[in-house]
Amino acid sequence: MFTGIVRALGEVVERSPRRLVVASPDLAPPPGASVAVNGVCLTVTGSSGRETVMDLSAETIARTALGDLRPGDPVNLEPALRVGDELGGHLLLGHVDTVGKVALVERKGEDVLLGIAFAPRYDAFLADKGSVGVDGISLTPFAVGDGAFRCAIVPYTWHHTNLSRRRVGDRVNLEFDILAKYVHKWRER
């Protein structure tokens, strides 16, 4: 489990169909550890002092935006939550629900307005002022509906995540709130 509070910004060294290598001197998880990379829970298969290696499955590439990564791209990193850790964001599992597209990046003074478009069938999982994971970042959506939402990005988040490199049209991983998904499933019965 994760909280959506990015702990380090890494840089892609290599991405092949079956492997992802990320450089991050601020985070050196041991083999076997879980790490969220742009919101996708991956298992560390190797680690040196500077680089972390993770395997990728065909399912992961097909259902996430990790296949878009190229060497030099920044990635949001968060180690798995440990008992006793602060729950600063909201609970995320690292299981991406869908891939959305950046529809708006608008600077408003120090703040940034970020708009995301996604398949409207997922509208039921979002609520104004609820929670959503965007590339592993815990954000608060508003103006929710018709396959879109917006988030106000504060300067700290803008400068300490990969959002500052996002452009209109970029694909992002979306994970909707786990409680919303369970309530939706329960109501369908």
Image: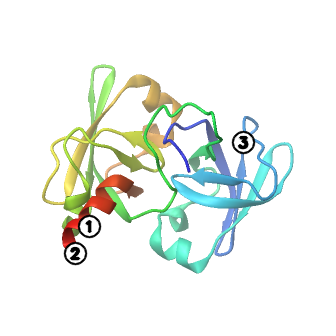
Residue beneath the point at 46% across and 46% down: 91
Secondary element type, mark 2: loop
Cβ–Cβ under 8 Å for marks 1 and 2 = yes
Q: Which mark is residue 24?
A: 3
Residue beneath the point at 48% across and 42% down: 4
Q: Position of residue 45 (x, y in %)?
A: 79, 62
Residue extending farthest to the right is: 48
Residue beneath the point at 68% across and 74% down: 18
Query: Left or right of 167: which side holds 59?
Result: right
Q: Label 1 sits on what residue type?
A: Trp
Query: On the image, which quarter does residue 152 sit in?
Result: top left
- The residue wearing badge 2 is 189
Q: Depth-wise, is mark 2 or mark 3 nearer the camera?
A: 2
Q: Label 3 sits on what residue type?
A: Ser
Residues at marks 1 and 2, CA–CA distance in whole angstroms: 6 Å
- The residue wearing badge 1 is 186
Query: Left or right of 123: which side holds 32?
Result: right
